[in-house]
Image: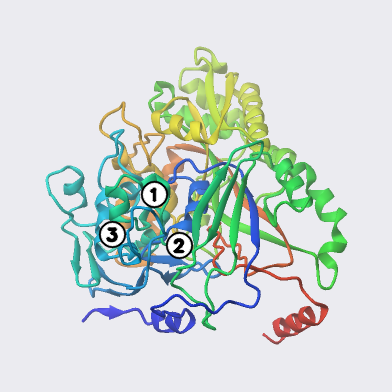
Amino acid sequence: MAKLFSALIILNLIVSACSKTSNKQFEFSGGTITMALDNQPSTYIARDVSDYYSATVLNQICEGLVGIDPKTTKILPKIASEWKRGNDGKSYTFTIRDDVFFHEHAVFESKEERKLTPEDVVKTFELGCTLNSDGIAPSLFSMVCKDLIKGANEFMSKSANSISGIVVKDNKVTFELVYEDHNFLYKLANVNADIVSKKIVESGYETDVIGTGPFVYNKFKDGEIPKLILTKNQDYYIQDEEGNALPYMDSVVFLFQSRKLAQLDLFEEGQTDFIIGLPTSRITRMLEGRIEDFNSKPPKLVLANNALLESNFYFFNMLDERFKDPRVRMAFNYAIDKEVIGREILRNQYYDLGDYGITPPVGRALKGYDFKSIKKQGYSFNPEKAKKLLAEAGYPGGKGFGSVQLRFNINDTHSAVADEFSKQIFQVLGINVNIDGSTFEQLIQDQQNGNGDIFRLGWSADYPSPESFLANFYGKSIPDDINAPSMVNKGRYKNLLFDQFFEKAIDAQKISDQMLYFAKAEAELLKNPAIVPLWYTGDIEISNSYVRNLHFNALNYIDFTRVYLKEWTEDEYQAKLQENKNN
């Protein structure tokens, strides 16, 4: 007999599932919240998203069958009111709600035409298993469907007219999997799996950004500081526990500013309501200079120091003949003094330095993962060993190696780190590293197409598992055509032992076994390195205290659905302190 997740019973008591949109408004509804993002979205097509900025924007507009609770990072029901998991763990049946409507658009002739149906779910995954106009597989295929959902590969290759593993019966959609996947629900909660309207797509209006989420795409304003405005979805189907309509905010505004110094100025001038990550040159001034604002009762500012599942690293282009020798890649790793980067550039604003692998050592989020054994394979600064390895590879003192192009997206931190990396590699290995900065959008394209020798990348976990990081180096995700973009494994790294351990982890029946094999895969990734780990993000977040219900989490997942604005009174603040003390 299939198992119904008991957690849904609790969740459905908390999140009202009324069939009609509530007219009841929360007492403190209304207003606008504004945040700055380093870069504009590189795409507004959810199934193609592969970056944090696109995901952060689209997470407010679009939704999947399930979602993530921003406070606990646990799975929540969204478009699906409930789900049943088969006894063998290889099937999931989702019950589709009958009160979910796509945002208004001229293509819809009535509200009934806007209602989301199981056919929209099927269309979403068929699009995810179809090459786009450039002949590229969407991220939805690479990250969720490929080799996992029955019939997905066959549909992609056009040897089948439908995805056999996705079956619709009445208001239920069943997914049949090739193997049990402990992270399947988290994969469905990823922005790539957000449901699109079949009618919108077939009418040619998908770029109009129509979703079912709490906010509606309103307008984009270009200028010195580009601005994107989202407005409240008046037909949003989820209510709070008191029956009030969600979301609370009337609008969300994103300002796009790549310079952290400028972002801090926007915050201090009151143009944004919170800031994620401080410019390193202003940390002391901000924290000590406004100490009274943090310590007053009630406070004016609230500080959070958040350890993220986010890695900052450089990866090698394995199409470059020089980097096919692992001794060269090991030499680059030993040549970097990360302590200098952490102290002089980051000003100690990080969670940990890159002495581990690709997976951030956040034990509370990745319980049971063997970070200790992985660290043994990590790299610390050892210039003599670096020189020896490079000489053994045939390039003593860097002779005959030639120059290297380092590609990165320009901002205060990344530019400074690239400059320091270039200096250290020259000082230790005698190799010239030419730093080449660009926009974030251009960098992503160049990474996928191999236009460069070494690339900067920051990777945030889509779900709390090492798989979310290690999948970027799985050899079987590389396209057969050397000229085709490599969307996931951008460095085109191939390591048979890594792949074997990765596959054993995926096939593991127990999560403990899965963690064991993921750790073995990551250790192999370091023995034969594909990357230069630099640091793991630990952002300082500062928000005005009037911003309520804004949760910072290890996934760096922002959800404005329940956020509202209200100044604290002294009595309210004292009552909150007492409540926290009692708990």
Q: The disc labelled 3 sits on which kind of residue?
A: Asp
Tell whether 279 sits left or right of 10.
right
Query: Circle 2: is it few (<14), some (14-19), or many (20+) Cα within 10 Å?
Result: many
How far separated are the C-alphas under marks 1 and 2? 37 Å
Residue at 18% in and 48% down: 155
How far separated are the C-alphas under marks 3 and 2? 15 Å
x, y percent for residue 195 = 35, 58
Query: Circle 1: is it few (<14), some (14-19), or many (20+) Cα within 10 Å?
Result: many
Asked which secondary structure carries label 2, the reply is: loop
Query: Mark number for residue 213?
Result: 2
Q: Earlier in the sequence, mark 3 or mark 2?
A: 3
Measured along the vertical axis of the image, is residue 541 above or below residue 171? Answer: above
Q: What residue is disc 3 on?
A: 120
Q: Are marks 3 and 2 in contact (CB under 8 Å)?
A: no
x, y percent for residue 335 = 60, 31
Quarter placement of the N terminus: bottom left
Tell whether 396 sits left or right of 516.
right
Residue at 30% in and 49% down: 201
x, y percent for residue 488 = 38, 42
x, y percent for residue 409 = 57, 33
Query: Circle 3: is it few (<14), some (14-19), or many (20+) Cα within 10 Å?
Result: some
Q: What residue is disc 1 on?
A: 521
Q: Is residue 25 visible?
A: yes
Asked which secondary structure carries label 3, the reply is: helix
